[in-house]
Amino acid sequence: MNKTEARIIAGRAKRRVKDLIWEICGKGIKVNELSKPPRSILFICKGNICRSPFADRLAKKMFDDTLRHKVAIDSAGLDVKSPCPSPQNAIEAAAGFGIDLQDHRSKPFKAEMVHDFDMIVAMETGQYKALAKNSAASHAELFLLPFFENKNMHPSGYERYNLADPYGKSLEEFNRCFQRIERCLAGMAKMINAL
Protein backbone atom coordinates (compact mmCIF):
# COMPACT_ATOMS: atom_id res chain seq x y z
CA MET A 1 0.00 0.00 0.00
CA ASN A 2 1.38 3.40 -0.98
CA LYS A 3 1.06 6.66 0.99
CA THR A 4 -1.89 7.93 -1.04
CA GLU A 5 -3.89 4.75 -0.48
CA ALA A 6 -3.04 4.85 3.23
CA ARG A 7 -4.27 8.48 3.48
CA ILE A 8 -7.52 7.57 1.73
CA ILE A 9 -8.13 4.63 4.06
CA ALA A 10 -7.26 6.74 7.13
CA GLY A 11 -9.61 9.52 5.95
CA ARG A 12 -12.48 7.06 5.48
CA ALA A 13 -11.87 5.55 8.91
CA LYS A 14 -11.82 9.00 10.51
CA ARG A 15 -15.12 9.96 8.81
CA ARG A 16 -16.71 6.69 9.93
CA VAL A 17 -15.72 7.27 13.57
CA LYS A 18 -17.03 10.84 13.34
CA ASP A 19 -20.33 9.54 11.93
CA LEU A 20 -20.64 6.91 14.67
CA ILE A 21 -20.15 9.59 17.32
CA TRP A 22 -22.84 11.75 15.70
CA GLU A 23 -25.24 8.80 15.45
CA ILE A 24 -25.05 8.60 19.24
CA CYS A 25 -24.90 12.35 20.01
CA GLY A 26 -27.50 13.21 17.40
CA LYS A 27 -30.24 11.23 19.09
CA GLY A 28 -30.45 13.94 21.76
CA ILE A 29 -30.84 16.77 19.26
CA LYS A 30 -34.44 17.79 18.79
CA VAL A 31 -35.31 20.67 16.55
CA ASN A 32 -38.90 21.84 16.43
CA GLU A 33 -40.86 21.70 13.24
CA LEU A 34 -42.48 24.68 11.60
CA SER A 35 -45.87 25.45 13.11
CA LYS A 36 -46.78 28.41 10.91
CA PRO A 37 -45.36 30.14 7.84
CA PRO A 38 -42.57 32.53 8.84
CA ARG A 39 -42.60 36.21 7.93
CA SER A 40 -38.86 36.58 8.54
CA ILE A 41 -35.79 34.30 8.57
CA LEU A 42 -32.26 34.90 9.89
CA PHE A 43 -29.49 32.54 8.72
CA ILE A 44 -26.59 32.07 11.14
CA CYS A 45 -23.10 30.63 10.73
CA LYS A 46 -19.73 31.26 12.36
CA GLY A 47 -18.25 34.20 10.44
CA ASN A 48 -21.10 35.27 8.13
CA ILE A 49 -18.80 35.19 5.09
CA CYS A 50 -19.66 31.87 3.36
CA ARG A 51 -22.69 29.77 4.31
CA SER A 52 -25.16 32.19 5.88
CA PRO A 53 -24.78 35.03 3.34
CA PHE A 54 -25.12 32.50 0.51
CA ALA A 55 -28.22 30.99 2.16
CA ASP A 56 -29.61 34.51 2.70
CA ARG A 57 -29.24 35.58 -0.93
CA LEU A 58 -30.23 32.25 -2.46
CA ALA A 59 -33.33 32.07 -0.25
CA LYS A 60 -34.36 35.56 -1.35
CA LYS A 61 -34.04 34.47 -4.96
CA MET A 62 -35.72 31.07 -4.51
CA PHE A 63 -38.47 32.10 -2.11
CA ASP A 64 -39.66 35.02 -4.24
CA ASP A 65 -40.53 32.45 -6.89
CA THR A 66 -41.84 29.62 -4.69
CA LEU A 67 -43.47 30.97 -1.51
CA ARG A 68 -47.03 32.18 -1.36
CA HIS A 69 -46.08 35.20 0.76
CA LYS A 70 -43.16 37.59 1.13
CA VAL A 71 -40.48 36.71 3.70
CA ALA A 72 -37.85 39.12 5.07
CA ILE A 73 -34.46 37.37 5.05
CA ASP A 74 -31.05 38.28 6.49
CA SER A 75 -27.88 36.67 7.85
CA ALA A 76 -25.34 37.13 10.64
CA GLY A 77 -22.40 35.39 12.27
CA LEU A 78 -21.70 34.28 15.83
CA ASP A 79 -17.99 35.13 15.64
CA VAL A 80 -17.69 38.42 13.75
CA LYS A 81 -15.17 40.96 15.06
CA SER A 82 -15.33 43.38 12.13
CA PRO A 83 -16.97 43.50 8.70
CA CYS A 84 -15.17 41.09 6.34
CA PRO A 85 -15.80 40.21 2.70
CA SER A 86 -16.56 36.71 1.46
CA PRO A 87 -13.50 34.73 0.33
CA GLN A 88 -12.85 34.45 -3.40
CA ASN A 89 -13.88 30.76 -3.56
CA ALA A 90 -17.23 31.64 -1.98
CA ILE A 91 -17.75 34.45 -4.49
CA GLU A 92 -16.89 32.19 -7.42
CA ALA A 93 -19.04 29.28 -6.22
CA ALA A 94 -22.00 31.57 -5.48
CA ALA A 95 -21.77 33.05 -8.99
CA GLY A 96 -22.47 29.56 -10.36
CA PHE A 97 -25.88 29.76 -8.64
CA GLY A 98 -26.56 33.27 -9.93
CA ILE A 99 -25.72 34.80 -6.53
CA ASP A 100 -23.40 37.81 -6.17
CA LEU A 101 -21.44 37.92 -2.89
CA GLN A 102 -18.88 40.51 -4.02
CA ASP A 103 -20.45 43.32 -1.99
CA HIS A 104 -21.16 41.21 1.10
CA ARG A 105 -19.63 42.26 4.43
CA SER A 106 -20.10 40.14 7.53
CA LYS A 107 -22.15 41.33 10.46
CA PRO A 108 -22.41 39.98 14.01
CA PHE A 109 -25.42 38.30 15.56
CA LYS A 110 -26.88 40.48 18.30
CA ALA A 111 -29.21 39.20 21.01
CA GLU A 112 -31.93 41.69 20.05
CA MET A 113 -32.18 40.05 16.62
CA VAL A 114 -34.21 37.23 18.17
CA HIS A 115 -37.13 39.63 18.43
CA ASP A 116 -36.92 40.64 14.77
CA PHE A 117 -37.15 37.18 13.16
CA ASP A 118 -39.71 34.36 13.24
CA MET A 119 -37.05 31.79 12.36
CA ILE A 120 -33.36 31.65 13.22
CA VAL A 121 -31.62 28.98 11.17
CA ALA A 122 -28.16 27.66 12.13
CA MET A 123 -25.80 25.71 9.90
CA GLU A 124 -24.34 23.49 12.63
CA THR A 125 -25.43 21.90 15.87
CA GLY A 126 -22.85 23.88 17.88
CA GLN A 127 -24.30 27.14 16.58
CA TYR A 128 -27.83 25.93 17.32
CA LYS A 129 -26.86 25.06 20.89
CA ALA A 130 -25.02 28.36 21.40
CA LEU A 131 -28.09 30.29 20.27
CA ALA A 132 -30.41 28.20 22.46
CA LYS A 133 -28.17 28.68 25.49
CA ASN A 134 -27.00 32.27 25.14
CA SER A 135 -29.88 34.21 23.69
CA ALA A 136 -33.46 35.03 24.47
CA ALA A 137 -34.62 32.87 21.56
CA SER A 138 -37.00 30.10 22.44
CA HIS A 139 -36.35 26.66 21.01
CA ALA A 140 -39.45 27.10 18.84
CA GLU A 141 -37.67 29.85 16.88
CA LEU A 142 -34.44 27.93 16.29
CA PHE A 143 -33.83 25.51 13.44
CA LEU A 144 -30.97 23.54 11.90
CA LEU A 145 -30.70 24.03 8.15
CA PRO A 146 -29.63 20.39 7.51
CA PHE A 147 -32.98 19.22 8.95
CA PHE A 148 -34.75 20.72 5.92
CA GLU A 149 -32.83 18.46 3.54
CA ASN A 150 -34.41 15.17 2.52
CA LYS A 151 -33.43 12.78 5.32
CA ASN A 152 -32.51 10.12 2.77
CA MET A 153 -29.55 12.26 1.68
CA HIS A 154 -27.92 11.97 5.13
CA PRO A 155 -29.97 9.64 7.34
CA SER A 156 -27.46 9.72 10.20
CA GLY A 157 -23.98 10.78 11.18
CA TYR A 158 -22.26 14.16 11.11
CA GLU A 159 -23.90 15.40 7.88
CA ARG A 160 -27.40 14.84 9.27
CA TYR A 161 -26.81 17.48 11.96
CA ASN A 162 -24.21 19.79 10.42
CA LEU A 163 -23.57 21.68 7.23
CA ALA A 164 -19.76 21.72 7.19
CA ASP A 165 -17.91 25.01 6.84
CA PRO A 166 -16.05 25.23 3.49
CA TYR A 167 -13.91 28.19 4.63
CA GLY A 168 -10.28 27.75 3.59
CA LYS A 169 -11.12 24.83 1.32
CA SER A 170 -11.25 24.31 -2.43
CA LEU A 171 -13.74 25.72 -4.90
CA GLU A 172 -15.08 22.17 -5.25
CA GLU A 173 -15.84 22.08 -1.50
CA PHE A 174 -17.66 25.42 -1.75
CA ASN A 175 -19.71 24.11 -4.67
CA ARG A 176 -20.66 20.99 -2.68
CA CYS A 177 -21.63 23.08 0.34
CA PHE A 178 -23.68 25.52 -1.72
CA GLN A 179 -25.44 22.67 -3.55
CA ARG A 180 -26.43 21.26 -0.19
CA ILE A 181 -27.69 24.65 1.00
CA GLU A 182 -29.79 24.84 -2.18
CA ARG A 183 -31.33 21.41 -1.40
CA CYS A 184 -32.04 22.44 2.19
CA LEU A 185 -33.70 25.68 1.08
CA ALA A 186 -35.86 23.79 -1.42
CA GLY A 187 -36.98 21.53 1.43
CA MET A 188 -37.66 24.55 3.63
CA ALA A 189 -39.76 26.22 0.92
CA LYS A 190 -41.74 23.01 0.47
CA MET A 191 -42.46 22.78 4.21
CA ILE A 192 -43.45 26.44 4.44
CA ASN A 193 -45.86 26.10 1.53
CA ALA A 194 -47.42 23.01 3.11
CA LEU A 195 -48.48 25.00 6.20
Image (cartoon, helix red, strand yellow):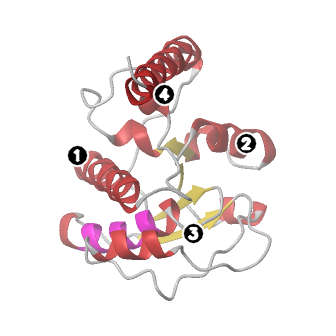
Q: Which range of residues does the magenta coloring cover?
A: 54-64
Relative to residue 95, is residue 136 depicted above or below? above
**Distance from label 1 to label 4 (Cα)?**
28 Å
Instruction: Please name which of the two marks, 2 or 1, marks the residue nearer to the observer.
Output: 2
Which residue does the numbered mark 2 point to in the structure image? 130
The x and y percentages for residue 115 are: 67, 62
Packing grade of label 4 (10 A; few <14, some 14-19, many >=20) is many
Q: Earlier in the sequence, mark 1 or mark 4?
A: 4
* Residue type at tag 2: Ala
Residue at (35% x, 66% y) in the render: 59
* Residue type at tag 1: Ala
Is there CB contact under 8 Å for labels 3 and 4?
no
- For numbered disc 3, what is the local secondary structure? loop
Which residue does the numbered mark 3 point to in the structure image? 49
The x and y percentages for residue 157 are: 44, 21
Residue found farthest to the front: 2
**Label annotation for residue 194:** 1
The x and y percentages for residue 132 are: 70, 40
* Residue type at tag 3: Ile
Instruction: Please name which of the two marks, 3 or 2, marks the residue nearer to the observer.
Output: 3
**Distance from label 2 to label 4 (Cα)?**
18 Å
Residue at (80% x, 45% y) in the render: 134
Which residue does the numbered mark 4 point to in the structure image? 158
Residue at (53% x, 21% y) in the render: 18
Confirm whether residue 29 shows in the render: yes
